Amino acid sequence: MISQMTKIAAELTLTLTLTLAGAACSPAERPVLTPLGAAAPAPLCAANPWESPARKVLDAHCGSCHRQDLPTARPAALAVFDLTRETWYDTIRPEQFEPLLMRIRGSADIEALERIDVERFVGCARDGLCE
Ligand code: HEC
């Protein structure tokens, strides 16, 4: 009897923990299987399918200030996102995605297909549109 109650309590705690973790990671409430068993960036967070294509675009066009391994890096820029970090996007605050898109759209050097990769990345990261 007591052990059964302990088990129920443990299950409740687990459910609560999972619920809270899911809330902190809203676009990713369901588990996602990544190809080749690649590790997800964080437990319970779905991988953003456009994380890598978007990083490539930003690397080419924004890397001079947003990569800590370059002498031209700017600390204030790294605080927003640092493209050398594995989960480079987890420091971007929700309200920073719109200015990010504006910079992408405002750059004449960025081609339409590159822009679409970044837009889809933001759609997943910010709006939970991950398919
Ligand atoms: C010449 C250096 C430099 C380049 C190149 C650069 N950034 Fe930044 N970025 C900064 C600095 C410095 C900050 C922090 C100060 C600020 O908010 O302007 C920043 C902040 C930001 C912010 C958060 C501030 C905001 O506007 O809300 C975003 C988003 C951003 N950068 C996106 C980009 C994108 C996307 C590119 C490429 C298209 C880019 N940056 C290229 C230097 C740069």
Image: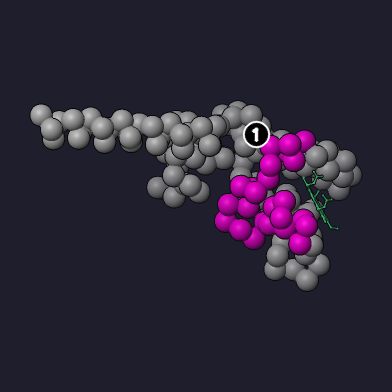
Depth check, front residue: 96 or 57: 96
Residue 121 horizontal/vertical position (percent): 65, 38
> If the image is split into quadrants, where does the N terminus sit?
top left
Which residue is depicted at the point 77% across and 42% down? 100
User: Is residue 35 at all visible to an observer of this figure?
Assistant: no
* Furthest-left residue in this view: 1
What is the magenta range? Answer: 75-98
Residue 104 figure quarter = top right
The residue beneath circle 1 is 126
**Magenta-colored stretch includes residue 39:** no
The residue shown at (26%, 32%) is: 9
Q: x and y percent of residue 58 in the render? A: 73, 51
Residue 34, image x, y percentages: 45, 42
Judged left or right of residue 94, residue 71 is right
Pick the front one: 84 or 26? 26
Q: In this view, does 97 lie above or below 62?
A: above
Is residue 43 in view?
yes
Q: Which amino acid does label 1 sit on?
A: Arg
The residue that appears at 20% across and 35% down in the rendered structure is 6
- Kindly indicate the quadrant of the structure image that contains residue 117: top right
Outermost residue toward the bottom?
71
